Image (cartoon, rainbow, N blue to C red):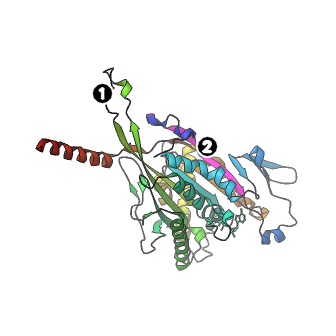
């Protein structure tokens, strides 16, 4: 049922060696909001974008600025459709081809992470974000008879994983498959998705629980990482190479086929705000809480540094987030990161550190691997049928 595409990820990946795939990083600038129009009216633009050169400049003073190159530079005029096409679509296509994929947003609170990823676009469909558009493309490509799509939606807050589809389900463990190295959260609610309406409903429920959970904890949703996991399972038939048979004449053989199954996963991560949390506990947090909230994000930064410095030890085990994202950085997934920034010179410190995070992530190399295996279930069904036939023939 699978359509082969000419995406680079498909090329030569069958022999199991994998295909090199660097983490791709785009930067997106949010338009000025009403408050900034007034407050920053007298300031020269602090951020200057050159999208055709894929460059971003941060002004240091009247004479001087620092220049950075990204894989994509998305201006304040970039539409949600264009952002999807540039940042997410190549990842979604890889997932449909049988590779794991990650789409992640990183940036200060209020710079557009949730708008970019989670916007439902119910009032204006042109506003639809990456989650909704990804599912649209997935549902359009799969065959309901042979393939399936299941989704879970969780958040990490203070190093516990909570089910956004069932808030009573708290403190969910991460499970690692020792055979494949795959990481999952089987304790989270898993919903089969057959149409876009039920997916929108799921996202609505998840978002409501994200807000409610954080209200109860007396915090803001900007302090938690929201993680959507979309599992795509597809059946594929591979015909054996009969021509290579030792007996030259193969005309008497019926062409055998090998049942294969591809189980790939798209992970969409709306990270907690990257701004430093003040240790004074100004928002009712103790020092201990502030540390815990920062733990996953700083662990992610440390893992990315270790990967780019080719350290033999990458501290994935240091946090829940990095354990879950093990395959996304330095692993087998195709990963796309979008770093979001605001235009205000009042946040130049946070904006610079977001840019530097993005620059480091661009150096991380992944090795994409096809998540394909022998379909034992399908084979055993076939064998049962054949055994039944043999028994029937013998009894005759
Ligand atoms: P974050 O999730 O990073 O905290 P949000 O996505 O909630 O930020 O964005 C903050 C506000 O800015 C929201 O009201 C959102 O609708 C608006 N916004 C963000 N990005 C854009 C954009 N590219 N165009 C228009 N409005 C945007
Ligand atoms: Mg948000």
**383 left or right of 39?**
left
- The reply to whether dot 2 and dot 1 touch (C-beta < 8 Å) is no
Q: Does the residue labelled 1 lie within 8 Å of ligand 2?
A: no
Q: Which residue is more in the foreground, 165 or 391? A: 391
Rendering coords of residue 76 (x, y %): 76, 59
Return the residue nearer the eye: 390 or 32. 390
Q: Position of residue 314 (x, y in %)?
A: 49, 47
User: Which span of residues is magenta-colored?
Assistant: 15-32
Quadrant of the rendered image containing residue 283:
bottom right
Q: Position of residue 215 (x, y in %)?
A: 56, 78
> What is the CA distance from the residue labelled 2 to the residue labelled 1?
54 Å
Quick one: SS at disc 1? Answer: loop
Q: In this view, does 302 lie above or below 11?
A: below
Callout 2 crowding tier (Cα within 10 Å): few <14, some 14–19, many ≥20:
some
- Residue 23 belongs to magenta span: yes
Q: How many labels does the image show?
A: 2
Q: Which mark is residue 252?
A: 1
| Left or right of 250, for residue 85 | right
User: Quarter of the picture for ligand 2?
Assistant: bottom right
Q: CB at mark 2 closer than 8 A to ligand 1?
A: no
* Horizontal side of residue 107 vs 396, given as left or right: right
Residue at the extreme left: 395
Does residue 258 sit above or below 113 in this rendering?
A: above
Q: Mark 2 points at which residue?
A: 363
Q: Is residue 319 visible?
A: no
Q: In which quarter of the image is the C terminus?
A: top left
């Amino acid at each position: 049922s699978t359509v082969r595409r000419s995406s680079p990820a498909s090329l030569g990946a069958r022999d199991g060696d994998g295909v090199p795939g660097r983490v791709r990083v785009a930067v997106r600038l949010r338009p000025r909001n009403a408050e900034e129009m007034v407050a920053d009216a007298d300031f020269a633009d602090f951020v200057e974008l050159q999208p055709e050169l894929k460059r971003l400049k941060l002004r240091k003073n009247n004479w001087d600025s620092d220049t950075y190159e990204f894989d994509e530079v998305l201006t304040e005029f970039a539409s949600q459709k264009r952002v999807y096409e540039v940042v997410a679509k190549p990842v979604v296509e890889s997932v449909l081809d049988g590779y794991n994929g990650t789409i992640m947003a990183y940036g200060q609170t209020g710079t557009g992470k949730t708008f970019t990823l989670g916007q439902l676009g119910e009032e204006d469909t042109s506003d639809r974000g990456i989650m909704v558009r990804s599912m649209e493309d997935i549902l359009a490509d799969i065959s309901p008879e042979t393939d399936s799509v299941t989704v879970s939606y969780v958040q990490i807050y203070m190093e516990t994983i909570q089910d956004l589809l069932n808030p009573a389900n708290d403190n969910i463990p991460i499970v690692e498959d020792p055979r494949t190295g795959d990481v999952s959260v089987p304790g989270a609610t898993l919903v089969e998705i057959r149409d876009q309406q039920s997916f929108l409903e799921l996202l609505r429920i998840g978002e409501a629980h994200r807000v409610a959970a954080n209200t109860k904890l007396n915090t803001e949703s900007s302090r938690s990482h929201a993680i959507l996991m979309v599992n795509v399972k597809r059946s594929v038939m591979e015909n054996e190479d009969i021509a290579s048979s030792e007996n030259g004449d193969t005309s008497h053989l019926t062409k055998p086929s090998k049942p294969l199954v591809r189980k790939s996963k798209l992970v969409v991560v709306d990270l907690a705000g990257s701004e430093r949390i003040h240790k004074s506990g100004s928002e009712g947090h103790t020092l201990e809480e502030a540390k815990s909230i920062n733990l996953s994000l700083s662990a992610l930064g440390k893992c990315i540094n270790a990967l780019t410095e080719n350290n033999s030890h990458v501290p994935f085990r240091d946090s829940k987030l990095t354990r879950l994202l093990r395959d996304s950085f330095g692993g087998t997934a195709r990963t796309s990161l979008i770093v979001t920034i605001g235009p205000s010179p009042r946040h130049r410190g946070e904006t610079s550190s977001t840019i530097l995070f993005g620059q480091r992530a661009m150096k991380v190399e992944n090795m994409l691997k096809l998540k394909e295996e022998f379909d034992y279930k399908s084979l055993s069904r076939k064998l049962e049928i054949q055994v039944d036939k043999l028994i029937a023939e013998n009894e005759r």
